[in-house]
Amino acid sequence: MLTSDDVDDFAQRLDQATLEAQAVTQLTTTKAFSLAEAYTIQRAGIALRKLRGDELVGLKMGLTSRAKMVQMKVEVPIYGHLTRSMILEDGGTVLRASHIHPRVEPEIAFLLAKDLEGPVTPAQALAAVDCCCCALELIDSRFENFQFTLQDVVADNASSSRFVLGSRVRPRDTDTGNLGMVMTKNGVVVETGSSAAIYEHPARSLAALANQLVSLGEQLKAGMIVMTGGATAAMALSPGDRARVDVDGLGSAELFVV
Ligand code: 0L1
Ligand code: MG
Protein backbone atom coordinates (compact mmCIF):
# COMPACT_ATOMS: atom_id res chain seq x y z
CA MET A 1 0.00 0.00 0.00
CA LEU A 2 1.26 3.49 -0.87
CA THR A 3 1.83 6.17 1.74
CA SER A 4 0.83 9.75 1.01
CA ASP A 5 4.56 10.52 0.55
CA ASP A 6 4.74 7.82 -2.13
CA VAL A 7 1.73 9.33 -3.91
CA ASP A 8 3.28 12.82 -3.81
CA ASP A 9 6.65 11.52 -4.96
CA PHE A 10 5.13 9.61 -7.92
CA ALA A 11 2.89 12.52 -8.94
CA GLN A 12 5.88 14.88 -8.83
CA ARG A 13 8.06 12.54 -10.88
CA LEU A 14 5.41 12.45 -13.63
CA ASP A 15 4.76 16.18 -13.42
CA GLN A 16 8.48 16.92 -13.78
CA ALA A 17 8.76 14.45 -16.67
CA THR A 18 5.94 16.34 -18.43
CA LEU A 19 7.41 19.78 -17.80
CA GLU A 20 10.93 18.77 -18.86
CA ALA A 21 9.89 16.36 -21.65
CA GLN A 22 12.14 13.72 -20.12
CA ALA A 23 11.03 10.10 -19.86
CA VAL A 24 11.12 8.34 -16.48
CA THR A 25 11.22 4.67 -15.53
CA GLN A 26 7.91 2.97 -14.75
CA LEU A 27 6.69 3.80 -11.25
CA THR A 28 5.70 0.19 -10.60
CA THR A 29 9.36 -0.87 -10.75
CA THR A 30 9.89 1.21 -7.56
CA LYS A 31 6.82 -0.02 -5.69
CA ALA A 32 3.71 -1.98 -6.70
CA PHE A 33 0.33 -0.26 -6.33
CA SER A 34 -3.32 -0.91 -7.08
CA LEU A 35 -5.50 0.61 -9.79
CA ALA A 36 -7.32 2.70 -7.17
CA GLU A 37 -3.95 4.03 -5.96
CA ALA A 38 -2.98 4.76 -9.59
CA TYR A 39 -6.03 7.05 -9.87
CA THR A 40 -5.00 8.71 -6.59
CA ILE A 41 -1.57 9.48 -8.14
CA GLN A 42 -3.31 10.77 -11.28
CA ARG A 43 -5.51 13.14 -9.23
CA ALA A 44 -2.44 14.32 -7.27
CA GLY A 45 -0.78 15.18 -10.59
CA ILE A 46 -3.81 17.18 -11.72
CA ALA A 47 -3.77 18.99 -8.36
CA LEU A 48 -0.17 20.07 -9.09
CA ARG A 49 -1.29 21.55 -12.42
CA LYS A 50 -4.15 23.37 -10.72
CA LEU A 51 -1.64 24.92 -8.32
CA ARG A 52 -0.01 26.45 -11.41
CA GLY A 53 -3.36 27.98 -12.44
CA ASP A 54 -4.55 25.24 -14.80
CA GLU A 55 -8.19 24.09 -14.59
CA LEU A 56 -10.20 21.00 -15.36
CA VAL A 57 -12.15 21.15 -18.64
CA GLY A 58 -13.11 17.53 -19.09
CA LEU A 59 -12.12 13.88 -19.06
CA LYS A 60 -10.77 11.38 -21.55
CA MET A 61 -11.30 7.70 -22.03
CA GLY A 62 -8.34 5.49 -22.95
CA LEU A 63 -7.81 1.87 -23.95
CA THR A 64 -11.25 1.87 -25.59
CA SER A 65 -10.38 -0.34 -28.55
CA ARG A 66 -10.73 -4.10 -28.27
CA ALA A 67 -7.05 -4.53 -29.28
CA LYS A 68 -5.77 -2.23 -26.49
CA MET A 69 -8.16 -3.74 -23.91
CA VAL A 70 -6.93 -7.26 -24.71
CA GLN A 71 -3.31 -6.10 -24.68
CA MET A 72 -3.67 -4.43 -21.27
CA LYS A 73 -6.06 -7.11 -19.93
CA VAL A 74 -8.80 -4.64 -18.96
CA GLU A 75 -12.58 -5.17 -19.03
CA VAL A 76 -13.43 -1.47 -18.80
CA PRO A 77 -11.50 1.44 -20.35
CA ILE A 78 -9.39 3.75 -18.21
CA TYR A 79 -9.86 7.50 -17.91
CA GLY A 80 -7.78 10.63 -17.50
CA HIS A 81 -8.27 14.35 -16.88
CA LEU A 82 -8.25 17.15 -19.47
CA THR A 83 -7.06 20.57 -18.38
CA ARG A 84 -7.25 23.94 -20.14
CA SER A 85 -3.52 23.99 -20.93
CA MET A 86 -3.96 20.77 -22.96
CA ILE A 87 -6.32 22.44 -25.47
CA LEU A 88 -4.79 23.09 -28.87
CA GLU A 89 -6.89 25.05 -31.33
CA ASP A 90 -7.79 23.38 -34.62
CA GLY A 91 -4.80 23.83 -36.94
CA GLY A 92 -2.57 24.74 -34.01
CA THR A 93 1.12 23.97 -33.63
CA VAL A 94 2.93 21.85 -31.05
CA LEU A 95 6.63 21.82 -30.35
CA ARG A 96 8.29 18.44 -30.79
CA ALA A 97 10.91 19.54 -28.26
CA SER A 98 8.20 19.92 -25.58
CA HIS A 99 7.29 16.25 -25.91
CA ILE A 100 9.02 12.94 -25.25
CA HIS A 101 7.68 10.70 -28.05
CA PRO A 102 4.38 12.21 -29.27
CA ARG A 103 1.77 10.15 -31.05
CA VAL A 104 -1.65 11.20 -32.25
CA GLU A 105 -4.93 9.30 -32.46
CA PRO A 106 -8.30 10.07 -34.09
CA GLU A 107 -11.25 10.45 -31.74
CA ILE A 108 -14.85 11.61 -31.29
CA ALA A 109 -15.46 14.13 -28.49
CA PHE A 110 -18.69 15.09 -26.75
CA LEU A 111 -19.49 18.40 -25.07
CA LEU A 112 -21.95 18.07 -22.23
CA ALA A 113 -25.06 20.23 -21.96
CA LYS A 114 -26.03 18.82 -18.57
CA ASP A 115 -24.41 17.17 -15.58
CA LEU A 116 -24.16 13.43 -16.16
CA GLU A 117 -24.21 11.00 -13.28
CA GLY A 118 -24.14 7.19 -13.52
CA PRO A 119 -25.50 4.65 -13.60
CA VAL A 120 -26.64 5.43 -17.15
CA THR A 121 -27.15 3.62 -20.42
CA PRO A 122 -25.50 4.94 -23.61
CA ALA A 123 -28.85 6.44 -24.69
CA GLN A 124 -29.26 8.21 -21.34
CA ALA A 125 -25.68 9.46 -21.57
CA LEU A 126 -26.35 10.91 -25.03
CA ALA A 127 -29.29 12.87 -23.63
CA ALA A 128 -26.77 14.92 -21.63
CA VAL A 129 -24.70 15.77 -24.72
CA ASP A 130 -24.86 19.20 -26.31
CA CYS A 131 -22.75 18.47 -29.38
CA CYS A 132 -20.10 16.18 -30.75
CA CYS A 133 -17.04 16.78 -32.88
CA CYS A 134 -14.13 15.00 -34.46
CA ALA A 135 -10.94 15.32 -32.47
CA LEU A 136 -7.26 14.45 -32.28
CA GLU A 137 -5.58 13.41 -29.07
CA LEU A 138 -1.84 13.82 -28.72
CA ILE A 139 -0.57 11.16 -26.35
CA ASP A 140 2.94 11.27 -24.92
CA SER A 141 3.62 8.62 -22.31
CA ARG A 142 6.00 9.92 -19.69
CA PHE A 143 7.57 6.43 -19.49
CA GLU A 144 10.66 5.28 -21.36
CA ASN A 145 9.91 3.62 -24.71
CA PHE A 146 6.13 4.16 -24.27
CA GLN A 147 6.17 1.00 -22.10
CA PHE A 148 3.98 0.73 -19.00
CA THR A 149 1.75 -1.43 -16.86
CA LEU A 150 -1.95 -0.59 -16.44
CA GLN A 151 -1.22 1.06 -13.08
CA ASP A 152 1.61 3.14 -14.57
CA VAL A 153 -0.47 4.48 -17.46
CA VAL A 154 -3.39 5.38 -15.18
CA ALA A 155 -1.03 7.24 -12.83
CA ASP A 156 0.31 9.02 -15.94
CA ASN A 157 -3.11 10.52 -16.77
CA ALA A 158 -3.67 7.89 -19.49
CA SER A 159 -0.69 9.24 -21.49
CA SER A 160 -2.65 12.37 -22.39
CA SER A 161 -0.80 15.47 -23.54
CA ARG A 162 -2.85 17.78 -25.82
CA PHE A 163 -6.11 17.61 -27.78
CA VAL A 164 -7.72 19.35 -30.73
CA LEU A 165 -11.46 19.64 -31.35
CA GLY A 166 -12.89 20.08 -34.85
CA SER A 167 -16.07 21.99 -35.61
CA ARG A 168 -19.16 21.16 -33.55
CA VAL A 169 -22.15 19.12 -34.80
CA ARG A 170 -25.30 18.50 -32.78
CA PRO A 171 -25.82 14.83 -31.87
CA ARG A 172 -29.39 14.74 -33.09
CA ASP A 173 -28.03 15.40 -36.57
CA THR A 174 -25.43 12.64 -36.53
CA ASP A 175 -25.36 9.11 -35.15
CA THR A 176 -21.73 8.73 -34.08
CA GLY A 177 -21.96 4.92 -33.87
CA ASN A 178 -20.28 3.95 -37.13
CA LEU A 179 -18.61 6.89 -38.83
CA GLY A 180 -15.68 6.42 -41.17
CA MET A 181 -12.48 7.99 -39.82
CA VAL A 182 -9.34 8.69 -41.85
CA MET A 183 -6.10 9.95 -40.31
CA THR A 184 -3.41 11.39 -42.56
CA LYS A 185 0.16 12.56 -42.09
CA ASN A 186 1.27 15.24 -44.52
CA GLY A 187 -1.68 14.37 -46.77
CA VAL A 188 -0.91 10.63 -46.88
CA VAL A 189 -3.43 8.21 -45.36
CA VAL A 190 -1.87 6.40 -42.38
CA GLU A 191 -4.86 4.99 -40.47
CA THR A 192 -8.47 4.30 -41.43
CA GLY A 193 -11.21 3.09 -39.11
CA SER A 194 -14.70 3.52 -37.79
CA SER A 195 -16.02 5.21 -34.67
CA ALA A 196 -17.51 1.78 -33.89
CA ALA A 197 -13.98 0.85 -32.74
CA ILE A 198 -14.40 3.31 -29.84
CA TYR A 199 -15.76 0.87 -27.26
CA GLU A 200 -18.30 -0.24 -29.90
CA HIS A 201 -19.95 3.22 -29.83
CA PRO A 202 -18.65 6.58 -28.51
CA ALA A 203 -21.86 6.89 -26.46
CA ARG A 204 -21.05 3.58 -24.77
CA SER A 205 -17.64 5.00 -23.86
CA LEU A 206 -19.32 8.11 -22.39
CA ALA A 207 -21.74 5.98 -20.35
CA ALA A 208 -18.87 3.76 -19.12
CA LEU A 209 -17.05 6.88 -17.92
CA ALA A 210 -20.10 8.18 -16.05
CA ASN A 211 -20.59 4.74 -14.51
CA GLN A 212 -16.93 4.43 -13.41
CA LEU A 213 -17.03 7.82 -11.73
CA VAL A 214 -19.96 6.89 -9.46
CA SER A 215 -17.74 5.21 -6.88
CA LEU A 216 -14.84 7.67 -7.21
CA GLY A 217 -16.38 10.93 -6.07
CA GLU A 218 -15.83 12.66 -9.44
CA GLN A 219 -18.60 14.08 -11.64
CA LEU A 220 -19.19 14.92 -15.26
CA LYS A 221 -20.50 18.49 -15.30
CA ALA A 222 -22.33 20.57 -17.89
CA GLY A 223 -19.79 22.24 -20.17
CA MET A 224 -17.19 19.50 -19.85
CA ILE A 225 -15.46 17.92 -22.85
CA VAL A 226 -15.25 14.12 -23.03
CA MET A 227 -12.76 12.49 -25.41
CA THR A 228 -14.22 9.04 -26.01
CA GLY A 229 -11.07 7.18 -27.12
CA GLY A 230 -8.93 6.38 -30.14
CA ALA A 231 -10.53 4.72 -33.17
CA THR A 232 -7.24 3.42 -34.63
CA ALA A 233 -3.64 2.85 -33.63
CA ALA A 234 -1.78 6.04 -32.73
CA MET A 235 0.59 7.64 -35.27
CA ALA A 236 4.08 8.84 -34.30
CA LEU A 237 4.92 12.49 -35.05
CA SER A 238 8.13 14.29 -36.03
CA PRO A 239 8.97 17.97 -36.65
CA GLY A 240 7.36 19.17 -39.88
CA ASP A 241 4.41 16.76 -39.67
CA ARG A 242 0.80 17.80 -40.26
CA ALA A 243 -1.66 15.33 -38.69
CA ARG A 244 -5.30 15.45 -39.71
CA VAL A 245 -8.45 13.43 -39.08
CA ASP A 246 -11.52 13.47 -41.31
CA VAL A 247 -14.71 11.94 -39.94
CA ASP A 248 -17.88 11.21 -41.96
CA GLY A 249 -20.35 14.03 -41.31
CA LEU A 250 -18.24 15.66 -38.60
CA GLY A 251 -15.57 17.44 -40.64
CA SER A 252 -11.89 17.51 -39.75
CA ALA A 253 -9.35 18.51 -37.13
CA GLU A 254 -5.63 18.99 -37.54
CA LEU A 255 -2.39 19.94 -35.86
CA PHE A 256 1.16 20.77 -36.90
CA VAL A 257 4.45 19.80 -35.31
CA VAL A 258 7.52 22.03 -35.44
O1 0L1 B 1 -6.07 7.47 -25.22
C1 0L1 B 1 -5.64 6.31 -25.22
O2 0L1 B 1 -6.31 5.33 -25.61
C2 0L1 B 1 -4.25 6.06 -24.70
C3 0L1 B 1 -4.37 5.47 -23.35
C4 0L1 B 1 -3.07 5.06 -22.82
C5 0L1 B 1 -2.41 3.97 -23.56
C6 0L1 B 1 -1.45 4.51 -24.55
O3 0L1 B 1 -0.69 5.41 -24.22
O4 0L1 B 1 -1.45 4.00 -25.67
MG1 MG C 1 -7.01 8.76 -26.72
Image (cartoon, rainbow, N blue to C red):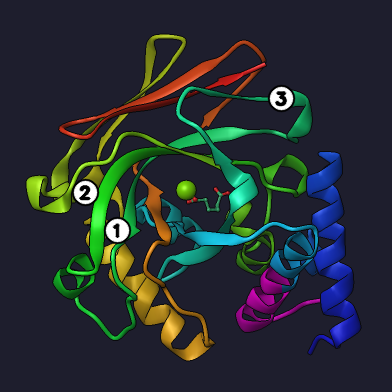
Label of residue 196 in the image: 2
Say above or below: 144 vs 34.
Answer: above
Ligand 1 within 8 Å of disc 3? The answer is: no
Callout 2: 10 Å neighbours few (<14), some, many (20+)? some
- Closer to us: 227 or 102: 227
89 relative position to 118: left or right: right
Label of residue 199 in the image: 1
Q: State the image coordinates of residue 169 (x, y, percent, origin top left).
A: 21, 42
15 relative position to 85: left or right: right
Is 168 in the magenta? Answer: no
Q: Main secondary structure of the magenta part?
A: helix
Q: Which residue is rendered at x = 80% and y = 67% of the image?
A: 11
Q: Amino acid at mark 1?
A: Tyr
Q: State the image coordinates of residue 23 (x, y, percent, origin top left).
A: 82, 44
Q: Which residue is rendered at x = 62% and y = 83% of the image?
A: 36
Residue 29 seen in the figure: no
Q: State the image coordinates of residue 189 (x, y, percent, origin top left).
A: 35, 16
Say above or below: 61 vs 195.
Answer: below
Magenta-highlighted residues = 31-43
138 relative position to 124: left or right: right
Report how far apart the C-alphas of labels 1 and 2 lie in the structure: 7 Å
Label of residue 96 in the image: 3
Say above or below: 73 vs 134.
Answer: below
